[in-house]
Image (spheres, grey):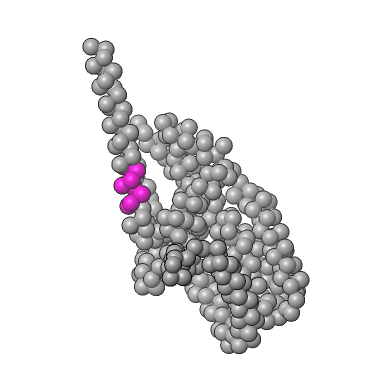
Amino acid sequence: MSTTSTGTLQVRARSNISQRIIAAGILVAFLYWASTFIITLLISVLIAYFLDPVVEWMERFRIPRATGALIVLLVGSFLLGLIFWAAWLRVEDFITNWPTYRQPLQRVTSALKERMDSIESRIKEVQGEDKQGRLLVEVREESMLKGLLTRGLGSAYVIFLSASFVPFLVFFMLAERQDIWHATMQLFPPTERTRVKVALEDLGAMLRSYIVGNFVVAVILGVASSLFFWMIGLGNPLLAGMVSGASNLIPYLGTVVAWLPPLVVGLATFKSWEPFVGIAVVLTFMHLVAVNVLIPALVGRQVHLNALAVTIALLFWGWMWGGAGLILGIPITAAVKVLCDHVEQWKPFGRWLGT
C-alpha cells in the first residue's frame, strides 16, 4: 500500500513539473508572438500611472474624472507635440548641415572598414583551403546592427498602428479607473480582497515612483548635458543633450548610448581626440551619479531589485522584445517582485529578486 502511494505521489510530482514547464513555454510563446499588443498595453498602463495623480488633483476641484482625464491627455499631447516639433527643428538643422558631418563620418567609417578588412584577411590566412584553393568555410551573416534595428524597431506601420491606440487606452484607464478597480476586486473571493487591494496599491506606488523618478532624472540629465555641450561649443547642444538624457531609460547600456549623439556631432567641430574622451568621461560621470544618487533618492525602495535579477531581466526581455524590452524589463520585473511579496507561495522568489 505504501509503495503504491509513493509511486502515485512521484507520478503526480512529475506531472506537476511537466505541466509547469508546458505552461511556462506557452507563456513565453504568447509574450513573443503577442509582443505588439502587450508592449502597447504596458506603455499605456505606465502613462496612465504617470498621469493619474494630476487627474486626482483635478478631482479635488470638482472636475469630473472623465473631463479631467480628457484635459490631461490633450495638454500632454500638446506638450509632447511641442517637444517633437522642437526636436524636429534640430534634426532638420542637422540634416541641412549634413555635408559638414559627412566627411568626418566617411573618414571614420573608412578607417574602421580598413581595420576590419585587415582583420578579415588575417583570419583568411589561417583558414584551411581545399585542393582548388577555395576556403573551406565562408559564411556571410546578417549585420548585427541591422538585425538589432530590425528586431527592435519593427515595421513603421506596426509602430504607428500601436501608437494610435495608446491615447484611447490611457483615456479609458484614467476615466474609468474606479469601475476598473471595482471590477478587478470582484474577480477575487471576499476573503482575499483585502490582500489583493494592498498588493495592487503597492504595485501602483512602485510603478508611479519608478516612472516619475526616471522622468525627473532624464530631464535633469538632459538639461545638464545640454549645458555641458553648449559650454564646449558642440553643435545642436539641446538635441544632443536631450537624447543623451533620455538614454538613461535604458539600464546599463544607456551610458554608452548617451555618447553617440555628441560624438557624431562633434566630428564636425573637434579636430583632435581629446574632446571626445572628455565628453565620454563627463557623460559617464553624470550617468553614474544619476544611477547611484538621483534614482535611489527619487525612486527610493519602491523598486528594490538586486543586480543579478536586473541583468537577467534585461537579457530576457531584451531578447524577447528588443529595444522595448530593455526599457520595460525593469518595471515588469519589479512588478513581479511586488506580486511575489504578497503571495505566500511566491515569497521566496520575491526575496531572491530583492536580495
In the figure, is residue 194 to the left or right of 267? left
Is residue 237 a member of the stretch shown in magenta?
no
Q: Is residue 103 above or below residue 67?
A: below
Residue 246, how many percent across, how many down?
A: 58, 64
Assign the N terminus to one quadrant of the image: top left
Q: Residue at x 30, y 24 (%)?
A: 10
In the figure, is residue 65 to the left or right of 238? left
Q: Residue at x 64, y 67 (%)?
A: 259
Considering the whole magenta stretch, tell me its main secondary structure: helix
Residue 227, how many percent across, how many down?
A: 71, 71
Foreground of the two, 313 or 332: 313
Foreground of the two, 175 or 283: 283
Foreground of the two, 186 or 97: 97
Q: Residue at x 43, y 70 (%)?
A: 132
In the figure, is residue 65 to the left or right of 230? left
Q: Report the magenta residues as a range.
A: 23-30
Can residue 52 be seen here? The reply is no
Q: Is residue 111 above or below residue 48?
A: below
Foreground of the two, 310 or 37: 310
